[in-house]
Amino acid sequence: MPDDMHQLILDAATRRFARSGVASASLSKIAADVGIQKPSLLYHFRSKAELHEAVIASLVERWRERLPSLLLAATDGESRFEAVVWEVVHFFAEDPDRARILLREMLDRPEWFRGLLVDQLSTWMDVVVAALRRGMTEGTIRDDLEPATAVMLATQLLLSGVATYDVLSAFEPADAPSTLETAASADGVPDGFERYLSQLVRFAHAGLFRDA
Amino acid sequence: MPDDMHQLILDAATRRFARSGVASASLSKIAADVGIQKPSLLYHFRSKAELHEAVIASLVERWRERLPSLLLAATDGESRFEAVVWEVVHFFAEDPDRARILLREMLDRPEWFRGLLVDQLSTWMDVVVAALRRGMTEGTIRDDLEPATAVMLATQLLLSGVATYDVLSAFEPADAPSTLETAASADGVPDGFERYLSQLVRFAHAGLFRDA
DNA sequence: CCTACCGATCGGTAGG
DNA sequence: CCTACCGATCGGTAGG
């Protein structure tokens, strides 16, 4: 883990791509982050385009690892959609750079991203839409929204809400009961961020569900 | 209007900045868009940084022009928040590049953007939050969300929903009743986009309001 | 994994 | 508004 140069480069590139964008992130700086020279980086990844693809592929792969639990959460009994929403928000919140990279790709290559969605998300979308339609006939889901559109909007809210937390928290009440501004809860997520996430989920929830 | 080179450059830069990001948009290409050479552009704007600032300032100025009607919509009687939401969504929808530029700034310079929000939006936020609190006591507004957070989330949903429409519409039903895929309604907004916008507004609405 | 180097492109300046 | 040019940095290659 600590000495797999391939993985170290991938992680550094992910960070740089997320914060500066792919075009503005230079191979020299990514190499410097892991303590090597640029030509050495280009031995592991033959071009910047290949490194870019690898970063995206790694992100997509981690999403696919999570899909089974997402589908389970979507199809089981009780509070199924709430479970899905929490799965999605945790996927982004455990590394906000994921959300930032995806948001940048949406802006940089919209048609490409659209194709990625159709390839990677169609199955998941079918399952979720079917469950939403059941919820509509049961009266738990709002029936004034196109199901697929509602899913996309809810996901976009979670994704962009996590990606831009640093900005959106500008007007958060500062009456945090924590003793340090860097106070973190058990799982390493800062207190303020966690409170924000629960509001994010509640907002997305309201977009899909009828009031209890 | 058509021969004001200063404005032509601003418009071209806005477009390039929105689609490629500031760092990746080159002054040469912006100059070429308006039919001049790069040194000629640098006569109108002394540096790329100055051009960047001018694009942002123009966007902020257009937002400030819209503020009065926003505050009116927020404080008048009946369906006040719905009017505000429509004002905001129209501000972005009439030129989605506005939303794209703002979203990129949030990713590129989060602390700077946070400061901009505090400077430019505090007054507006105070008015809207006060109105939201009244709505909570009246029972029309959901009371399980921090008002300022709810406003930020709703705005972020509208902004990022418009900015990434090309992506998020991937699963939109294609059963449009229009005769052409480029069919546009009276005000020049394509049919599919307009239907999407109304879903966007409905979703944001649900995040703020209780069910009727 | 390195040093040394390539052509292309960047933002910006000189000078007219 | 232009041509001509600057140093810096980019992605990538040669060669070891």
Image (cartoon, coloured by chain):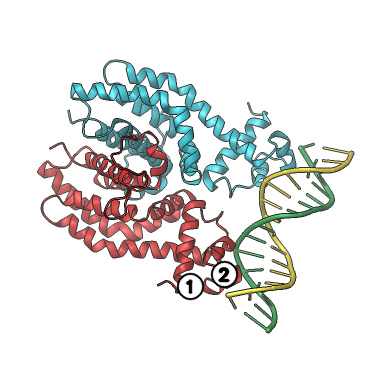
Chain colours: A red, B cyan, C yellow, D green
Is A149 left, or right, of A169 in this rendering? Answer: left
Mark 1 to mark 2 CA distance (whole Å): 10 Å
Residue B96 seen anywhere in this rendered image of the structure: no
In the figure, B99 relative to A49: above or below?
Answer: above
Q: Where does residue B4 sit, x and y in percent of width and height?
A: 67, 28
Q: Residue at x 50, y 57 (%)?
A: A16
Q: Quadrant of the N terminus of chain B?
A: top right
Is A171 left, or right, of A48 in this rendering? Answer: left
Is A64 left, or right, of B116 in this rendering? Answer: left
Q: Which quadrant of the figure has residue A66?
A: bottom left
Q: Where does residue A68 sit, x and y in percent of width and height?
A: 23, 63
Q: Nearer the viewer, residue B167 or B144?
A: B144
Q: Residue at x 46, y 54 (%)?
A: A18
Residue at disc 1, secondary structure: helix
Residue hosting label 2? A36
Numbered disc 2: what chain?
A
Whether callout 1 and callout 2 share a subunit is answered yes
Residue hosting label 1? A5
Q: Are marks 1 and 2 in contact (CB under 8 Å)?
A: yes
Question: Which amino acid type corresponds to the residue marked 2 in the rendered image?
Answer: Ile
Numbered disc 1: what chain?
A
